[in-house]
Image: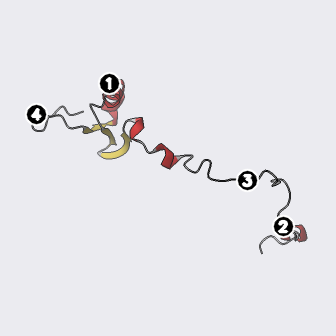
Amino acid sequence: MSNRSYGGVMPKIQKINATDFKAKCLDILDRVGDGELEKVAITKRGRVVAVLMPAEAMPVKALHGFMRGSVVIPPDFDLTSPVLDEPFGAEGGLLHG
């Protein structure tokens, strides 16, 4: 990881190759957790393969469970009863209809 400073201030976003990340990952995790680094781009052969950032910076609700509670099923609705009044085509040997 480069320790170059820009204008006397270390950049909050850094690139690091995978070998260096492996050797220094606990220190890097601490620095990200403390807010010293906003984002770390991990590279292999010069190509960014992963980005490390604080957990609270991730839009978790956008990724998983954001629609939780948005579907309402009436209490008298039976989810196990058939919804079609007509027989399934597969019963008659029809695979695609």
Q: Position of residue 41 (x, y in %)?
A: 32, 41
Mark nearer the viewer, 1 or 2: 2
Relative side of 15 to 84, left or right:
left
- Report the front residue among 8 and 40: 8
Name, please, the residue furthest toward the front.
Answer: 75
Q: CA distance from mark 3 to mark 2?
A: 18 Å
Mark nearer the viewer, 3 or 1: 3
Residue identified by numbered label 2: 84
Q: Which mark is residue 8?
A: 4
Mark nearer the viewer, 4 or 1: 4
Q: CA distance from mark 1 to mark 2?
A: 60 Å
- Report the front residue among 65 and 72: 72
Q: State which tag comes first along the sequence, 4 or 2.
A: 4
Q: State which tag comes first along the sequence, 4 or 1.
A: 4
Residue drawn at x 38%, y 35% is 54
Q: CA distance from mark 4 to mark 2?
A: 71 Å
Residue identified by numbered label 1: 27
Q: CB of mark 3 within 8 Å of CB of mark 1?
A: no
* Element at label 2: loop
Label 3 crowd (10 A; few <14 / some 14-19 / many >=20): few
